[in-house]
Amino acid sequence: MTNNILLIKTYITFNTNNIMRKKIVAANWKMNLTLEEGKKLVDGIIAGGAALSETKQVVIAPPYVHLTQTGTQLQGKAFMNLGAQNCYSEASGAYTGEISATMLASAGVQYVIIGHSERREYFKEDDMMLAKKTDQGLKNGLKVIFCCGEPLEIRDANTQNEYVGTQIKAGLFHLSVEELKNIVIAYEPIWAIGTGRTASSQQAQEMHAHIRCVIAAQYGAAAAADMSILYGGSCKPSNADELFACPDVDGGLIGGAALKADEFLGIIAAMVKA
Ligand code: PGA
């Protein structure tokens, strides 16, 4: 297995120059902003007029109650996609307070974030539930931003590669190579989320390359080379250039800095020029 991974690593690195995989900057508003504040923020982002394209896209994932409003604002804005922060693991039924992927799709949502560390930790979402949520998203035509990332004690013990590899296997390896095309992976080290402590570009690159190898070992080098892998955790305009310059970092999943139009536009600009 280790030898395979090494071989694949060489192959992927060798081929990255020809790859036109998507770069994406995705905003995760979490539980922030009133409808009025959200509207202003999206207006500000649209006014920024970022030079987006098929391979350089933006996703905005507001709280559920914003989806219709934000979706209306994004209508006709090419390469600006509407995302949701979660969906439920079942298709429909007596699950008071939950939202299904079918409902999201019917509201014009294109992306759904699954497995954010806050969902895993505070809401006790385990691997099996996340695999089911991923299935629900895909079944309804959504693209899934699947999150992974290690807590500080795992990083300190230097076992982050095994930890993140296990999260990916448990959440995604039941999918077919066709289904995998609608998956984006977001690597978010928990110790960097909302803490102001960003992973160094070297730490991010090493983990992203590892994730690509984990995907390659299961699905082949082409599928791995096509996979967009985003970095998340205190990404801001001042560090986005360096992070996005890494060959295996294909953009970012942005929390705090996505709540201010000028900061988010600065991060989008870094992605556009990377
Ligand atoms: P942060 O959050 O940018 O505020 O660190 C990122 C995330 O949790 O998606």
Image (spheres, rainbow, N blue to C red):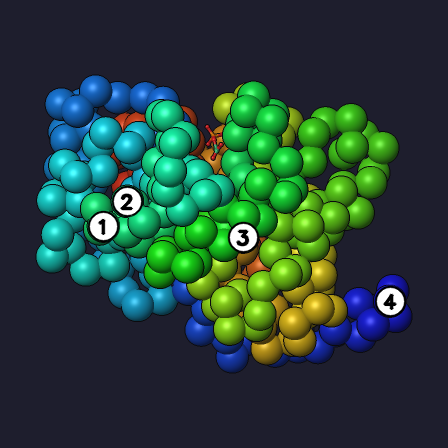
The 10 Å Cα crowd at callout 4, few under 14, some 14 to 19, many 20 or more, is: few
Q: Is residue 210 above or below residue 21?
A: above
Chain-order first, disc 3 or disc 1:
1
- The numbered disc on residue 185 is 3
Indicate the amino acid at tag 1.
Ser
- The numbered disc on residue 1 is 4
- The numbered disc on residue 103 is 2
Could you give the CA–CA distance between mark 2 and mark 3, rounded to whole angstroms? 23 Å
Between tags 2 and 3, which lies in front?
Answer: 2
Q: Position of residue 264 (x, y in %)?
A: 32, 37
- The numbered disc on residue 95 is none
Chain-order first, disc 4 or disc 3:
4
Which residue is the extreme one toward the front? 94
Q: Name the side, left or right, on which 67 lies relative to 115.
A: left
Kindly state the secondary structure of the residue where label 3 is placed.
Answer: strand
Chain-order first, disc 1 or disc 4:
4
Q: Position of residue 77 (x, y in %)?
A: 15, 55
Indicate the amino acid at tag 3.
Ile
Q: Name the side, left or right, on which 59 lies relative to 213.
A: left
Between tags 2 and 4, which lies in front?
Answer: 2
Residue in the image at 52% along x and 36% along y: 116
Indicate the amino acid at tag 2.
Met
The 10 Å Cα crowd at callout 1, few under 14, some 14 to 19, many 20 or more, is: few
